[in-house]
Image (spheres, helix red, strand yellow):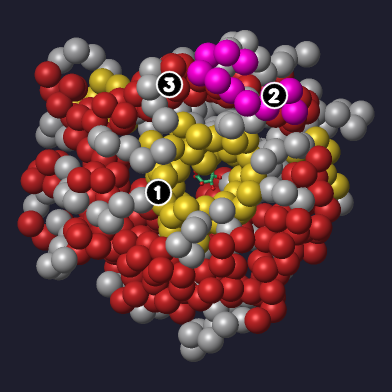
Amino acid sequence: MQKINLPDNSFMLSKDFLYGVATSSFQIEGDRKGRLDCIWDTFCSQPHTIEDGTNGDIACEHIANWKQDIALVDSLGVDAYRLSISWPRVMNADGSVNGIGMRFYINLVDELVSRNMKVFVTLYHWDLPQYLEDEGGWLNRKTAYAFEKYARIVAQALGEKVHAYATLNEPFCSAYLGYETGIHAPGKTGVANGRKAAHHLLLAHGLALKSLREICPNSLHGIVLNFSTCHAASNSDADKTATKWADEYHNQWYLKPILDGQYPAVIEQLAQDERPVVAEGDMEIISQPIDYLGINYYTRTVYRADASGWFEVVPPTDTNLTAMGWEITPDAFTELLVDLHHRYTLPPIYITENGAAMDDELIDGEVLDNDRTAYFHSHLNAVHDAIEKGVDIKGYFAWSLMDNFEWALGYSKRFGIVYVDYETQKRTIKQSGNAYAELVKSRINGYISGIK
Ligand code: GCO
């Protein structure tokens, strides 16, 4: 049976390194009747948007099963649980609070705290209320201010029982996939839309951050960004330049404004009317200090120059792929972390998502997903290597606690370390879940640099 092993002297084998599991509201909650519609409800109802034609109406029925789900999280021995709040579950369209929805999260947080787990709350994991999309969604600057108001209300309700707040999860996906390529909700397209949405998302982050800090000065406040390292298909200057643009366009576009207060140079490559309108003071709001950076990493991407010199993706030819068709590239994970560390003055880092979809089979009550365990093994060792190279990484969250709604791919892809039978809602810990729990439980107290 595949195990997850780390070098004997690893800091990650001490209890000073935090381990958790992560989920998000729309992907697991279900109970659509208990909330307002969000952009994903609308998107799912349109033809050919979701590969298996499903939606989030039922998902993992987490709203009904939350107590047993939290007991399950606890049984893994992890230190922390990362969840997201559904904006349309806690707020009504007139700006008032949905008391039942908010009560759900208060109870959830209380339960986690009573079990001694640290709570990491993400305020926005893509489920924008539809009534805001009807006003333009992230293309409308006002949405950033609506987000600030919502963040304030959540912070007042959950307070400092939350160990760490994240304003946004992966604004790249919200902006680029949602408003530029249209493969995610709300399905809008065009460079100008994508860049505008990204700017408003970053503004929303900055505005909310300020309020969160005011209301919960003792919690940590940050943002979760996803990165895919960019590799040139060849050594040609054209491919190398295109790859640099890709990195700036997809990765640094979200981090550089926050840490350096400016967009990367690739912005100059865009036509004037494709660039976001940056109002005076926006970059100051966006670049306030964060307490931590959440990093989500899954795979690398290879690029080449197209006929115009702009970048295009080269699909993997490798056979070492996950069920998503993503290359398994742990070395690129270390490379990413070390590269960011050299480029920026980083705050402490939490790996807020990492994991793999595999073709799981439940046989005789077991899922023997050695492939996923091997993925965790290699990627946790990649984190170890980055720490050894001087990167300040404080914790790691496996994506995901359980199989769930994988966005445009519906329920066809399973990322969980717990298997979900969608007919019965029965949860079964996969072999990878047991291996993860074993690693987490094997840690010892107290780590003095290098000596266990
Ligand atoms: C993301 C999201 C998750 C996904 C996961 C697998 O990173 O896209 O945060 O919601 O399910 O990443 O694609």
Q: Secondary structure at mark 2?
A: loop
- Rendering coords of residue 14 (x, y %): 62, 25
The CA distance from mark 1 to mark 3 is 20 Å
Q: Residues within 10 Å of mark 2 (few under 14, many from 20)?
A: few
Image-based side of 370 in relation to 13, left or right: right
- Asked if marks 3 and 2 touch (Cβ < 8 Å), the reply is no
Q: Are marks 1 and 3 in contact (CB under 8 Å)?
A: no
- Residue 376 x, y percent position in the rendering: 61, 24
Residue sitting at the far right:
364
Residue drawn where x is 56% and y is 17% of the image: 10
The answer for how far apart the CA atoms under marks 3 and 2 are is: 21 Å
Residue position for label 1: 291
Q: Name the residue tied to disc 2.
A: 444
Is residue 305 within the magenta segment? no
- Can residue 37 be seen here? The reply is no
Residue range highlighted in magenta: 441-452
Q: CA distance from mark 2 to mark 1?
A: 26 Å
